[in-house]
Image (spheres, helix red, strand yellow):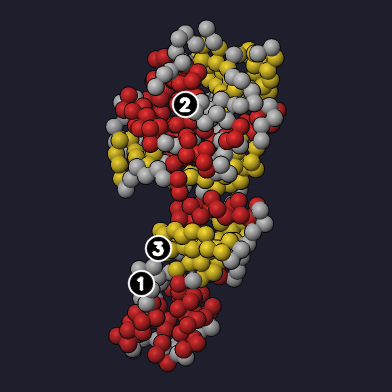
């Protein structure tokens, strides 16, 4: 009989425990909070977007994408679906996003805890782990109330993202003690900070746009969707997706610029479209014309940046003025100076190097019997259930290895 200690009672810890509790293994989950799965209850605005129909590699980020491809496979995705089916959770699929049909994250929490409890997993709450060491093939785990000895330890204690849920980055410190390489964790899926007089002017505006990201002048990628304009910069899901690139680029000293297209519904011939639009409404000045398209706060900013008088008429503008206006409408430049911090981010970019992990079992290559799962890994995904997918898969792989499963 083996004794397994799982550090962390989030998604990764509970899922690992379900598969590890086999063949009379003693499985104990040590959770620092008063209850488990605190972060899960917040996902998908409380509806729990637990995975996505699309799982191409463009949705994931890591310093070792070739290893990510070994982990996020279609076979493992199918195993996650089977796992949820076995738990009795019926999926509701909306725009490729998987939710429990109940639309309640508590459904997933109750199913996970019910399965773990039925299998005999033991839970210790309000339990803060202070140190982990290994002597004579045994792990010694010291908490603020007790000392444990174990054959296997699973680190499932999360990243540094949203520390109010209990993930304060302690797992990285434990891993450093075991000589693991930690790729600097940075805030990801997070709001972006800028500078400029326009920030105060556009605060509170929401707009459907397309965003182009440029790094040191080189085009990187694009996103479409609703953007939230704030007094510090920009927010919204499409912004969060770009933050995965921005946060690492800024850390490496690169210049990050986002260009906003405020009229993505118009094709490449914006100048021609706008000329016809102005002729059809020739009795309106440029301010009145633009307010038929954009929020009045944005109109004021666009005209100011274009150096055009608000009382002017489009048809009377010079070619140079028209070019400036079209440029500001579809390529409004926002310099990115930073991001909001760990208190605001949903996930971290970075983590333990995948080169030091067995991609088929999540066992450390440096320390036998030490398993690393979930957000501690150097894998982070876009919004849409991808980060939970990483948690499900890595935890299943670790749990099955510990429990002696054979696929």
Q: Are marks 1 and 2 in contact (CB under 8 Å)?
A: no
Mark 3 and mark 2 lie on one chain; the one further toward the N terminus is 3
The circle on residue 397 is 2
Distance from the alpha carbon under mark 1 to that under mark 2: 47 Å
Q: Residue at x 43, y 63 (%)?
A: 210
Distance from the alpha carbon under mark 3 to that under mark 2: 40 Å
Distance from the alpha carbon under mark 3 to that under mark 1: 15 Å
Residue 399, placed above or below residue 206: above
**Element assignment for label 3:** strand
Q: Would residue 383 appear left or right of 272 to someone viewing this image?
A: right
Point out residue 253 in the picture as x, y percentages from the top left corner: 67, 57
Local crowd size for mark 1, using a 10 Å CA cut-off: few (<14), some (14–19), many (≥20): few
Task: State the residue position of label 3.
Answer: 208
**Element assignment for label 1:** loop
Q: Would residue 354 appear left or right of 177 to someone viewing this image?
A: left
Q: Nearer the viewer, mark 1 or mark 2?
A: 2
Mark 1 and mark 2 lie on one chain; the one further toward the N terminus is 1
**Element assignment for label 2:** helix
Mark 3 and mark 1 lie on one chain; the one further toward the N terminus is 3
Residue 54, picture quadrant: top left
Point out residue 90 in the picture as x, y percentages from the top left corner: 29, 32
Q: Are marks 3 and 1 in contact (CB under 8 Å)?
A: no
Task: State the residue position of label 1.
Answer: 267
Q: Residue at x 42, y 81 (%)?
A: 287
Residue 308, placed above or below residue 223: below
Residue 276, picture quadrant: bottom left
Q: Does any portion of residue 346 appear in the rendered image? A: no
């Amino acid at each position: 009989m083996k004794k397994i200690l799982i550090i962390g009672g989030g998604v990764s810890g509970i899922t690992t425990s379900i598969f590890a509790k086999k063949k009379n293994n003693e499985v104990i989950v040590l959770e620092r909070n008063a209850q488990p799965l605190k972060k899960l209850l917040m996902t998908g605005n409380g509806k729990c977007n637990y995975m996505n129909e699309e799982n191409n590699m463009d949705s994931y980020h890591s310093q070792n994408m070739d290893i990510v491809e070994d982990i996020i496979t279609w076979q493992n995705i199918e195993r996650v679906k089977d796992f949820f089916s076995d738990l009795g959770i019926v999926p509701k699929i909306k725009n490729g996003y998987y939710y429990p049909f109940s639309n309640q994250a508590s459904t997933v929490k109750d199913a996970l805890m019910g399965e773990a409890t039925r299998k005999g997993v033991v839970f210790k709450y309000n339990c803060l782990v202070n140190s982990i060491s290994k002597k004579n093939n045994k792990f010694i785990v010291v908490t603020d109330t007790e000392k444990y000895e174990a054959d296997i330890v699973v680190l499932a204690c999360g990243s540094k993202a949203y520390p109010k849920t209990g993930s304060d980055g302690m797992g990285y410190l434990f891993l450093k003690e075991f000589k693991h390489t930690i790729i600097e964790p940075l805030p990801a899926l997070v709001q972006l900070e800028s500078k400029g007089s326009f920030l105060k002017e556009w605060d509170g505006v929401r707009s459907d746009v397309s965003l182009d990201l440029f790094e040191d002048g080189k085009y990187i990628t694009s996103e479409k969707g609703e953007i939230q304009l704030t007094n510090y910069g920009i927010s919204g899901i499409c912004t969060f997706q770009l933050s995965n690139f921005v946060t690492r680029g800024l850390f490496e000293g690169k210049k990050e610029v986002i260009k906003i297209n405020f009229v993505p519904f118009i094709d490449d011939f914006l100048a021609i479209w706008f000329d016809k639009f102005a002729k059809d409404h020739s009795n309106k000045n440029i301010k009145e014309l633009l307010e038929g398209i954009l929020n009045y706060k944005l109109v004021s900013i666009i005209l100011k940046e274009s150096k055009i008088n608000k009382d002017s008429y489009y048809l009377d503008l010079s070619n140079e003025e028209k070019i400036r206006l079209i440029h500001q409408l579809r390529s409004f430049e926002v310099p990115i100076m930073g991001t909001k911090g760990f208190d605001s981010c949903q996930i971290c970019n970075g983590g333990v190097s995948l080169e030091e992990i067995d991609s088929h079992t999540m066992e450390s290559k440096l320390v036998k019997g030490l398993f690393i799962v979930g957000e501690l890994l150097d894998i982070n995904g876009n919004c849409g259930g991808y980060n939970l997918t990483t948690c499900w898969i890595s935890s299943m792989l670790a749990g099955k290895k510990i429990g002696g499963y054979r696929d």
